[in-house]
Amino acid sequence: MPYSYENFYPGLAIQPSIQQSPYSDIFTGYRVPAGKIGTTLNPTTANQLAELTRRLNTGLKVIEAGALRPDVFEAIPKQHFEEMGRLAKLAGAEVTLHSPIVPPYGTGEALTEEFRKIAEEHLWDVVQKAKLAKSPTVTIHITATPELGPVTRKVNGKEVVEAIPVVDTATGKIAGYVRAEEITTPEAIVKGKRKISPEERLAMLNESQLRNTVLAFDRNVNEIGGELFDISLRKREIESALSSPGLSENQKKELMHLKSVLDTRAKHLSEQLNHMVKAFEETFSTIYDVSSPDVKAKLARLAKNFENLKPKIIQGDVGAFTHVLSQLNEIASMPDVGRKIKFLSPAEDRAAELSAKTIANLAAKAYKKFGENAPALCLENVFPEWGLSRAKKLREVIQKARQQFIEQNKAKLGEQKAREIAEKLIGVTWDIGHINMLKKYGYSDEDIAAETKEIAKFVKHVHVTDNFGFYDSHLPAGMGNVPIKKALKEIEKQTQEKLRFIHEAGGFINFFRGSDVPYALEALGSPLYTYMQAPFWNQFVHTTPGYFASFEYVFPETHTYGFGFSALPAELGGQARGGQGFSQAPME
C-alpha cells in the first residue's frame, strides 16, 4: 500500500545509535556543498573527452582530467583539451588538470640539473595544454621515486628516523640508505652501548671521507717526497764517488748508469707529483661544492695559498704541498665538519632544491605567456615514505619556489606584486588519503591532523579519498579511517582560496562498478539544495525503507498535508518546528 509522509520522513529526532553510523549520520558540524565536490576521469585512458562527457551528464561541476602515464597523456590530441574546455563552460563546470607522473626534480637515473631540465620542458607542455582546457589548476605529482624519503616510525609517541636515503652530492646518484646503528667503540663501551641516529651516522661518514681524502694525499705526497729525498742523497753519493781518484772506466760507467736510473725515477716522481696537483684541484672543487658557506670561506684562503705555492710544488717542492695539505687537515678537524661538508646528502633535500627551481621557472613562464590567467601549479603529496610529501618538506619546497619566482620577477613587477603572483600561482594539492598512509608506521589521527594543519594555508586543491592507512585503495569518503572532515575543516579555516574537492574513488569504481559520488555526498553531509541547510544527502537513508524501494515511497498518494512546502518540517525547509515528523507529533 502507499506510504504516507509519516512513514516517509521520521524527522531529526532519531536514535543516537543511528547518529554514530559512518553513513547517513545526522550531524550539525562541518559539511561540504555538493557544488564543491568533483571527481576524476579514468586516468588510464587517453580518451579523456569521452570520459568528460559522461561525467558532465551527471551534473558534476568540478572534474579532474588527465592520464597518469606520460605516454598515455601524450596520446591526447590538443583539440581534445580545447573541446573539454568548451564543454565544461557550456555545462557551467570547470576542468582541473592532473599532470602525468613527471616529478619536477626529473625522471632520470640521478638527481641532476640535466634531468631536471627535461622534466621542466615536459611539465611546461602540460601547463600549455591546461590553458587550452581552461583549467584553473594543474596538479603535479611531487615525487615518483620510492627511495627519496626517510624511513620514520612513531614509537611511544615520538617520531624515530630509522633510515635516510642519500645521494652522492657530486653526481646526484642514489647511494643507498644510511641507517641507525649500534656503535661499540672503547669509549662507547665504557659509557654503555648506544645507538646513533642516521643523521649522526651520515655526519660520521662525511667526516671520515674528508679525513681519508686528506690522509691519502698526505701518504702519497710523503711517499713521493721521501723517495725524492733518498734519490737526492744517492745522487750526491754517486757524484762524490765519481770525483774519487783511481776509478776504473767500468766503475765510472756503472755509477753513471745508476745516476741515469735515479734521474729517470726522479722524473717519474715529479710527474706523479704533477698528477697529484691535478687530483688535488679536482678534489678541492668537489669539497668546495659540497661545503657550507663558513667552510667555503676557509677553503678560499687555502685556494689562494695553493695558487701561490703551485709553481714550487710543480718544481718538486714537496714541503710546499705538505703545507697546503696541513691547512686542509685543519679544516677536516673542525667540530661538526661532517654536517658542513656533505659528500653524501639526504636525497630528499636534493630533490627539494631541484623541484623548487622547476616550479619557479614554470610559474614564471606561465605568467609571462598567460598573465593573470595562468593556471596555478599545485604540488601533490604522494606516499609519505617516498619523500617530499610530509607537510614540513612540501611546505619548504613551496616556499623556496615562491621566493625564487619573486627573485626572478621583482625587478620587473616590484617585490609586492611578484609575491602576490607567486602565492597565486604556486600551491599545494593536498591528498588526504596519501598522508593517512603514515598510519602503517604507527602514526595516529592526531598526527595526520597535525600534518594537514601545517600545510593548510598553502592548499589550493584537495584530493578526497579514503583508505585504512596501508594501501592507496581509493575508497569513497567514509569507507575507511581517514579523518576527512577534520582535514577539510582545517584547510578551509586557514586558506582564502576557492577550494576544489576532487573525490578519488577509482578503486571502488573498478571493483564494484558503481558511482562514487552518492557516497561522497553522504559522507560529507552535502545539502540537497544550494543553500547550506536541510535536507542533507546523509539523511536520505532514513527517508525510505531501503535503497531499492520504488517511487511510491517518495511520492505517496495520501496525507500530503496541503500544497507547497509550508507544512514540511523545518529541517526540510518548511515551517513546522520541534524536530518532529509530518504529523507534528513526537517520534515514538
Image (tube, grey):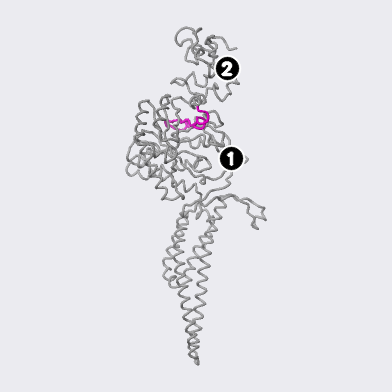
Whole-number angstrom distance, CA of label 2 to CA of label 1? 39 Å
Quadrant location of the N terminus?
top right
The reply to whether residue 325 is in sight is: yes
For the view shown, which residue lies furthest in the bottom direction? 246
- What residue does disc 1 label? 441
In the displayed structure, 198 sits above or below 246; it is above
- What residue does disc 2 label? 14
> How many other residues sit within 10 Å of disc 2, few (<14), some (14-19) or many (≥20)?
some
Q: Which residues are magenta?
A: 489-513
Quadrant location of the C terminus?
top right
User: Which mark identifies residue 411?
Assistant: none
- The image shows residue 409 at horizontal and vertical percentages of 35, 43
* Residue 517 lies in the magenta stretch: no
- The image shows residue 34 at horizontal and vertical percentages of 45, 24
The reply to whether residue 486 is in sight is: no
* Residue 510 lies in the magenta stretch: yes
> How many other residues sit within 10 Å of disc 1, few (<14), some (14-19) or many (≥20)?
some
Q: Amino acid at mark 2?
A: Ile
- The image shows residue 53 at horizontal and vertical percentages of 40, 28
Query: Who comes first in sequence, dot 2 or dot 1?
Result: 2
Residue at horizontal 66 percent and vertical 52 percent from the top: 193
- The image shows residue 548 at horizontal and vertical percentages of 53, 18
**487 or 468, which is in the foreground?**
468
Q: Amino acid at mark 1?
A: Tyr
Mark 2: secondary structure? loop
Mark 1: secondary structure? helix
